[in-house]
Image (tube, grey):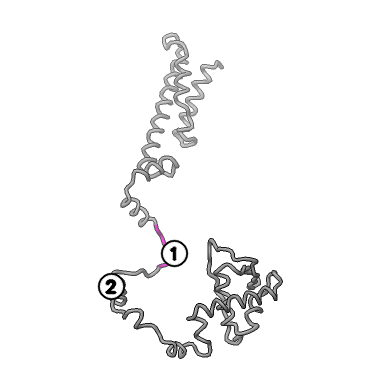
Amino acid sequence: MSSVEELYDRIIDLAIKVSEGAIDPFDVDVGRFIRQLARNKRLAELDYTYLIKDIRALNGLVAILEAQGKSLRRRGLGLYLDKMLLKLRIYKMSIDELSQVFIRSWKPVIEMESINLEAIKEAMFYFNNLKDLESRRLRFEELSEYMGDVEPRLFIEPKVVRSLMMKLLNELRDSSGGEYIDYKEFITRGDPVERAYILSFLISDGWVDVKVDRLEEKIWIRPKDMRVEIRNPSSLAVVVRREEG
């Protein structure tokens, strides 16, 4: 079999596979095959058998081009998940169109109640009718009724809090030796509510390191040699049970 005949058979075979969906039409380099056909001698000089194959091969290339065109139209109109076509289509869409796509495609697994206009009006009415802050501030005697046995000055006098912070920090340094110690054991050496409250300021201010063992559900604390500013603060919930104070 000559190289020309092999070329014809190769093109015809590819055209059949494309029509059957066995291969992607874009996997066929149509331009390269056309250039190879053009290098052959003139049709008038071809043998009858080769002439038939030449026509079939050329018809196959046309069929492959048609399949490529259909594929492009299908991809363009159907939002086919081709990376480049998808990106171009998104760039062409307006904000309203994108929001509609999101609404149609969003399938929440749970339903969540959201605030509506009526709730916003109620909130505005509530805040607009609040008394000024000064008239709502509790007096020392009134506050003590709500605080029970806990001394209110711990919560309302910054100077007292600062003094207790330094006292607790020095105690932590002396008892830990600069190493991690159990948080729960440390706060239960006295009034756990008061000590946990004061310790929270030391942690927030960057005087104390905190390490959490999620597996054993334990918290460890360690004093720092000097205050370090916390760049990415996070919250840590601590439960102080009634039987612990």
Q: Could you say which is closer to the camera, residue 153 or residue 47?
A: 153
Q: Which residue is drawn at 70% across and 73% down?
A: 176
From this view, report whether residue 171 is shown above or below residue 42. below
What predominant SS class does the magenta segment belong to? loop
Query: Can you give x and y, in whole percent of width and height, for residue 112 in the image?
Result: 40, 68
Mark 1: give few (<14), some (14-19) or many (20+) Cα within 10 Å. Answer: few
Quadrant holding the C terminus: bottom right
From this view, report whether residue 114 is shown above or below residue 45. below
For marks 1 and 2, the one nearer the N-term is: 1
In this rendering, position of residue 241 left or right of residue 173: left
Q: Residue at x 39, y 36 (%)?
A: 72
Specify whether residue 28 is painted magenta: no
Q: Which residue is drawn at 37% across and 40% down?
A: 76
Q: Quadrant of residue 209?
A: bottom right
Specify whether residue 107 is painted magenta: yes
- Disc 1 vs disc 2: which is toward the camera? 2
Query: Can you give x and y, in whole percent of width and height, for residue 194 in the image?
Result: 57, 82
Amino acid at the residue labelled 2: Lys
Mark 2: give few (<14), some (14-19) or many (20+) Cα within 10 Å. Answer: few
The outermost residue toward the right is 177
Q: Distance between the residues labelled 1 and 2?
A: 29 Å
Q: Which residue is drawn at 32% across and 50% down?
A: 97
Q: Regarding mark 1 in the picture, which secondary structure is present there?
A: loop
Query: Can you give x and y, in whole percent of width and height, for residue 25 in the image?
Result: 45, 33
Quadrant holding the N terminus: top right
Q: What residue range appears in magenta?
A: 106-111
Amino acid at the residue labelled 1: Val
Query: Can you give x and y, in whole percent of width and height, for residue 134 in the image?
Result: 35, 81
Q: Regarding mark 2 in the picture, which secondary structure is present there?
A: helix
What label sits on residue 109 in the rendered view?
Answer: 1
Residue located beneath label 2 in the image: 121
Determine whether label 1 and label 2 are within 8 Å by CB: no
